[in-house]
Image (spheres, coloured by chain):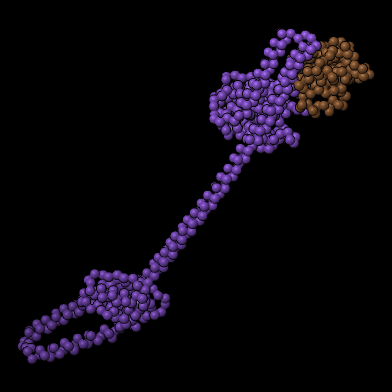
Chain colours: A brown, B purple
Amino acid sequence: MESIQRSNSTFSLLVVEDDKAAIEVILLMIPLKFPGVTVYAAADGRQGVELCKEHTPDIVITDINMPGMDGIHMAEEIRAINADTKFIILTGYSDKISLDKFSAIGVCDYIVKPLDFRTLFAAIEKCLNRDNGGTTIQA
Amino acid sequence: MRSHDDKAAPVARLRRSAEQQLKAKAAATVLPQTEADTLKLLHELRVHQIELELQNEELRRSHEELEASREKYSLLYDFAPVGYFTLTRDGTICKANLTGSSLLGQERSRLVKRRFGMFVDDQYRQGFAGFLVKVFANRETQTCELLLAPEAGPPLFVQIEATGAAAGAECFVAVINISVRKRLEAALALSREDLEQRIVDRTAELACSVGLQNEEMAGRLQAVEELRKNELLLIRQNRMAALGEMLGYIAHQWRQPLNVLGLKVQELGLSYELGGFSKELLDNNIARTMEILTQLSQTIDDFREFSSPDKEKSLFRVDLVAAKTVALLRDNFTELGIAIEVSSSGEPQVNGYPNEYGQVVLNVLVNAKDAFAGKQTSAALITVRSRREDGRAVLTITDNAGGIDEKIMDKIFDPYFTTKELGKGTGVGLFMSKTIIEKNMGGRFSARNVENGAEFRIEV
């Protein structure tokens, strides 16, 4: 296994995922990799929008299929609040159709479940690099 | 009637004969001697004369009576409805009445001395000769039927009765025209023959039509057989569709736990490398991983149980089958924002095929789910209720997706009828469900619209 290094950048991140077990692990792992991060968690789209209004996170990692407001509607609303928000979409194989709708909104990356942390970390890095003009701050 | 001359002649003859007899007796006659004797003789003569005259009158009257009676019998004889003949031993006609002569088509005067046999049809002549022999040999009346060939007119069928006269030289023959009877008999025989022919024809016709019916029946049986085959095909199609649907749900259900499994495993690696690894974390993740693996394994068992066809009827709880089916779908439905409420009372039981029953419940639930697609239903809800009703198990599945268009209500159970877009529905789900419930389990499967939605009712 390749070694994974900590990333030092300071940014805020929102994870929207209705699977409690999954969000628990994600919330633990992301700060391990990115110690400077502030992470918020929402269980559905509606909650996600509220947290965005409050904290305007740099990156939103979201599932597509969720009860209540789904990922697409949420992304549209968040875009309206903050046009700079980067989106990383966690998707299942069966959500292909929804991806087209996301493309219209403009997203940073798609990650197909089951989630591989290396891929997720890379996606976050990519978003941060764009933000910082291509430099990745590493420890 | 006799002429007057005929009457006068015998009287004159009588007078002559009497005078001759008197002349012969004259010699012996003693003339009267005295006036007294003469007077006495004269008195005697006068009395005698009156006696004679009385006798004569008596005779004349009885003669007239005889004459009248003869006249009467002669009329009876001549105009009898039967022909009468008197024949000699060789068949020569001695006497014939008028009816007889008209039967032979010849005047009476020309019949006498002719052979009766000459008026008999050639075919019967021999028989008639034999008949005559029998008549003279026997005292009893003999009867025969034969065909007369009169000299004028058509041939006649007659019945002949003959008796020999006491003297033995002649016989009396009565001839009855039975042509009409014969004709009727012939007509009867003909119509009987016709009837028999018709019976034969009709029997043949019936046999033929029975054959046709058998053929038709065979055709129908074949059609039924084909239908059954098609039905089996449909059942299989529906099963495949249901399994496909199930597989979709399983794939979906697995994605989440697989994701968590992956995360839990990666967590161990990441925390070992980046910090935070502990015995506690290891134990927790192993326990959670095993829990998820068991859960996934259970899903396979559920699916297998659901998808294996029932081989024999068994007693099963309708509410439990419904609950199991709902459990398979619930996560997926919840994700789509569709809530499922399940309630039951009275532990309704059915003797039937539980997996097929489950297939029906699945069909209806999936239909309800699809009915919500593209509709803005604020609180999508499917209610599954089961209960006992008059010894039967009743399960209703109700949604609030707006109901079924009344225009297509009577078509929804038709095979290949679907409102779903091309490739989305096979159109056999409800048809199959009806077949399963009504044909395989003797129940009833129906649908109706209720407030805001549709209700499907399964009653077994």
Q: Please tell me whether residue A5 is drawn above or below residue B96 in the rendered image.
A: above
Question: Residue A11 is drawn in which quadrant?
Answer: top right
Q: Nearer the viewer, residue A116 or B38?
A: A116
Q: In the shown orientation, is residue B119 left or right of residue B134? A: right
Residue B36 percent across, percent down from the top left: 7, 84
Q: Please tell me whether residue A100 is drawn above or below residue A116 in the rendered image.
A: below
Residue B392 percent across, percent down from the top left: 56, 25
Quarter of the image with the C terminus of chain B is top right
Quarter of the image with the N terminus of chain B is bottom left
Q: In the shown orientation, is residue A137 left or right of residue B7? A: right
Question: Residue B414 is drawn in which quadrant?
Answer: top right
Question: Residue A72 is drawn in which quadrant?
Answer: top right
The residue located at (78%, 14%) in the rendering is B270
The residue located at (31%, 75%) in the rendering is B128
The residue located at (88%, 13%) in the rendering is A138
Q: Residue furthest right?
A: A133
Q: Nearer the viewer, residue A107 or B76?
A: A107
Residue B262 percent across, percent down from the top left: 74, 19
Q: In the shown orientation, is residue B172 left or right of residue B404? A: left
Q: Nearer the viewer, residue B244 or B69?
A: B244
Q: Please tell me whether residue B409 is drawn above or below residue B382 in the rendered image.
A: below
Report if residue A51 is visible in the image: no
The residue located at (31%, 70%) in the rendering is B144
Q: Nearer the viewer, residue B421 or A113?
A: A113
In this figure, what is the number of numbered marks? 0
